Structure formats: C-alpha cells, structure tokens
Amino acid sequence: MELLPGNTKPKVDARFYARYAISALALLAMLFCFAKFASTMSIIVFAFVLALLTAIATPTFAYVLFASKLHDRTLLSETGYIAKITRGKILRILVSFVLSVFAMASLLLSVVRWGQSEWVIAIVGVIICPFAFMLANKISAHEFKLVFEKTGTLLLGGLLLMAALGIASAVVVVNTAAPQVNSVLECFLAHENPFGESSSTLLADAGLVTTYTDTVMSCLLSHIADASWSGYVGLQITLLVYSLGGFVNLLCTCMMPDCVIELFLPLADVGEPKERIQRRKLQPGLIALAAILAVAPIAAALWADAKAKEIESIDGVSEGKQLVRYQIGKAVYVIDGKTYDQEAVEMVLSDLSGETSQLTNHVQNTLVPLVNAAFDKRIENIDNYLDWYYSLPADYERVIRVFTGSLEEGLRNQLSTSLSQGIDDSGLNDEMQACVEQAAQLQEKLKNGLADCEVTNVPDWLQKPAEFNPQRLTEIQKPSEQLLEDSQRIATSVGAGAVGGFVVKKVVDRVVGEKAFAKMTTTLARSLGLKTASSAIGSVTGSVVPGAGNVAGFVAGTAIGTGVDFAILKADEMQNRQTYHDEIAEIIEQQRAEALAALPQAPRAE
C-alpha cells in the first residue's frame, strides 16, 4: 500500500492485495500445519519455523524503532559528533530481533492450543486487516508528517486490527461458559501436552510449562468468574487477544512489505533530499547481520535442546518436569508397593483412628466387664463342682468310671457343667458378636478407603513420595485383628458366638492338664484300696453279728461300708478341698488374664 504525493487515499492495486492474500493465507496455513503436527514435531522443524517467522516479524518492529530514532535525531545538529555516531541501525535491529523471537515463540506456543474459536478469529483477522490499514492510512495522512506517515499507518493499523479482534474475542467469550476448576492437578492432567510425543526434551518441557500456565490461568479465570462476570470477560478477552498478538504482527508485515527492504538500507534523516533517499543502496553489513540472525534461532534451539537432554540424563527428569512437579506435584505414600494419595490417606487414617479408638474404648468399658463377670461367676461355681465331687454318689460314679475307662471324661463333663451352672452368657455373646462385626466393618472400611486413595492417573514424574510409617497402619488394624482372631478361635473351638462355652472349655482343658486333676485321680486310686477294705470289713461284720440273718447282715455290712466310704471322702475333703479350689481358681485367673490380653487394649499414657 502506497501514498501518492499530496493524496490521502491509498492507491488501489489488485496485485498488492493478491500478494497480501497469498502471503497471509500462506502464514495461516503454515501455523495450522504447525499446530496439527506439533505433538510429534522435531526440534529442527520447530527451530526452522521459529526462524522463518522471526525473520518475517523483525522488519515491522525495526521500522517502528527506526522512526523513533529519526525523531530523536531531529534534536541533533547534522554536523555534530553524536549525529554521526548514531546513524547506524545495528542496535535497533538486534532489539527488534529479540522482540520478534519472543513474540513468535509465544505465538507458536499459543497456536498449538488454539481451538475452533481462535482459528475463526484468525481468519477474520486476515479478512479485515486491509480495511483496518485503509482506515489507519487515512488517519495518518491527516495526523502525521509525511516522513512519519508510514510509521503511523503501521502502528494505527496494528492497533485497529487488535481492536477488531478484541471485539470478535468478546463475542466468543460472552457465548462461552466460564471454566470450572476444582483441582489444579486435575485441571493440569486434563490438558494434553501439545508436544507430548516429541523427541525433543526442550519442546516437551515447553509444552509442560505451557500446559501448567494454562492450568493456572484456568483456575484464576474460574475464581474470577465466581466473583465477577465482567472481570472474567475482561481478563479472558485480554488473554485471547494477547495470544493473537504475534499473528497480528505477521499480518502487519504482509500489509507493508516495504518495511523489509528498509531494514537493509542506510538510515535516512528527516529533511534529506528525495533524490538522495532514493539513491540509497543495500548495505552488505546489514545483510550479513540479517543472515546471522536468521540462523541464530536454529542454533540456539539445537543447543538448548542438547543441554536439556544432558540435564535430563543426569537428574533422571527434565527441568520442565521438575518445575511442574515442584509447583503442583502430588504428594504420595508408597505402601506395599502401591502408590496412594497422601492427603486422602491421611483423611482415611484420621477417620479410622478415631473409630478404632471408639471400638477399643467400647471393648474396655463394656466387653471387658462382661468377660470379668463371666470369670467371676465361674470362680464362684468351683464350689458347685467340689460339692459334687465330695458327695457319695459322685464318689461311687467315679469308681464305676474307673472300671469303664471313662473317669477323665466324666470329671471333664462334670467340671464343665458345674462351672457354667446358673450362668447366662447371652449378653457376653451378643456384645462380643457386635464388637466383632464392628471390627470387620473397620477392616473393610480401611481396605476400601485405601483402594479409593490409590493413585492411578498421575505420572510417576509428577509424584512426590513422602515417608510413611507402617506402624500407623498396624496400630489401626491391631484392635480389629485381635477381635477377629478371637472370634475365629471361638468358632473353631466351640462354635460361633459361644464365648462362655469357649471360656469354660479353655479352663477345663487347663484344669485337666494341671496337677490338681492329677492329684484328684491319684487320691481316687488310693481310695479304691480303702473302699475294698471297707467292703470286706462290712461283709465280715455282717456275718458275725450275733442273731442277725443273712439280709440283716448284708444291710449292716453295707451300712458299715458306706460309713467308712463317707468317712474316707470327708477326710479327703478336709485335707484337699481348699487346695483343689485354689488351684482351679488360679487356672481360671490365668485364663482370665489371657482372655483380657487378647482383647484390644487402651493406649498407654506416655
């Protein structure tokens, strides 16, 4: 687009607009292909595209900086020393190059995340760009001096184009729902790394950092949208227009291609004759500088990628991953080879620790008194057994069982019956069953809770392992395991839920194996000899009693024998009953201690 001398209307040139359309669409197509194949792109391709776009964008930055320098030089004398040494362009070209590299790198990192709305806005920008520059050219012709007219057109054209794209962005934002973010990590994982499959460590890291930036902005937008809809719309429009800024710069170059030629020509001061300006020739030094700068992004990208690979090989993880992990990494516990969310595990353990303490307290306050009562009653019932034991019917029964070989079985059965006589263990059984069910529920809850905490969707590099003390799990599981083990032992021994029967069986088993029972058996063996003697005495006595018949003699003999047996039994009772009682009671107390020790214990105060 050119201005005729003294004419503020642009010279309409079909070829100019055709060239603009071709170059603009070519840029748009190149950006689209770049975004399409970004995930598998090599560093060479990325560096080449970056260098190409930087070369296209640099002239527009430089042209504006040259105009700024021309304005500054109007304050200097043409014959002065400062005017002579500040005539060059190298510094401003370098500044323009740096600005262009950052702008184009930002564009490439943005374009890979463009959605349908951004591409539509970009196409709209290609269409309305010529109209924006027509309006800018008309305004500049009235507002700027002729020497600064093109600079004004370039600046105003870019601003008008940005404003138009801002309006298009506002339409998109207003008709798009605000993002809802509950977790930064979940939001990050929901975003795909645009360079995720690239062989380049540098590009993969750049994609990670870009994804993290998008995550942070999504969270910010979500919070702002909840607080102020207008604030959200304003920020979202700003971000959208910013992502299109590099593309606007490229379109400006397409609209004013003569800026490229100006890059290699000597600086023309304000007021220089037109003929002298037109006779300016390309400077080889500036061309050489441009050639060097053109390959600089490629060399820098290759060097940076090699350095990134070296760091990754040394540290085992790239710098980009380290940065993201430091910011939003998931703290995890490794338990039995599985990975769990630390925060979730802490919540589960905290809840179960409280419930386990409640179960332990309930056992100590409710179940333990019932257990003690059951043992106390059985100690009281020892006398029931001894009363039976020191009765004549029991004595004769034992004699008969000696000859039938069932003495031990008889004593065992009688001891079991006597110890349980008059005792109702239903309350103890019910309470034990309730505690066991609660213990099973806690075990299941722990199992399911840990399963829910297992980390499956977070990559290893994003995890931050924390030290976990296995003793914490042991402390939570121990009370439940103790109750379940007790229940299993009872069910195996006497049947499910029969706590009282289990207690009696354990006591009887211990009594039968102890010296008290052996002593009873020995005493019985000795008494058999006495009983034989007493029977003989009774028989002889019955036969020699004067005047007694056979029947009377038998009765008298039997009475005398029974009396002797009773006397022997009472003598044994006087000598051994208390000893038997104490030894059986001691066994019951030992069993009580074992039973109580097997139940969950309250934590000891430190």
Image (cartoon, grey):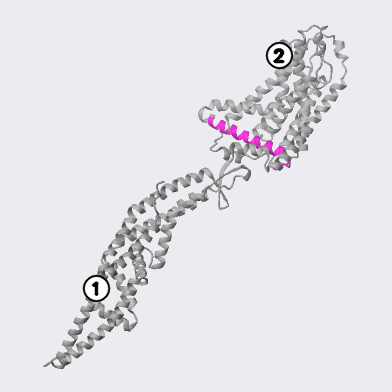
Residue 390 in percent (x, y) is at 24, 74
- Nearer the observer, 358 or 120: 358
* x 63%, y 43%: residue: 461
Badge 2 density bin: few <14, some 14–19, many ≥20, Cα 10 Å: some
The residue tagged with tag 2: helix, strand or loop? helix
Q: Amino acid at mark 2?
A: Ile
Q: Which residue is mark 1?
A: 573
Does residue 454 lie above or below 397 as drawn?
Answer: above
Q: Which residues are magenta?
A: 197-223
Does residue 400 lie above or below 17 as drawn?
Answer: below
Q: Which residue is mark 2?
A: 139
Residue 474 in percent (x, y) is at 48, 52
Is residue 204 a member of the stretch shown in magenta? yes
Is residue 134 a member of the stretch shown in magenta? no
Quadrant placement of the N terminus = top right
Q: Earlier in the sequence, mark 2 or mark 1?
A: 2
Q: Amino acid at mark 1?
A: Glu
**Disc 2 to disc 1, how far (Cα)?**
130 Å
Badge 1 density bin: few <14, some 14–19, many ≥20, Cα 10 Å: some
- Nearer the observer, 209 or 163: 209
Asked if the residue at tag 1 contacts the one at tag 2, i.e. Cβ–Cβ closer than 8 Å, the answer is no
- The extreme left residue here reads 547
Residue 6 in percent (x, y) is at 79, 9
Residue 449 in percent (x, y) is at 49, 49
* Magenta region, main secondary structure: helix
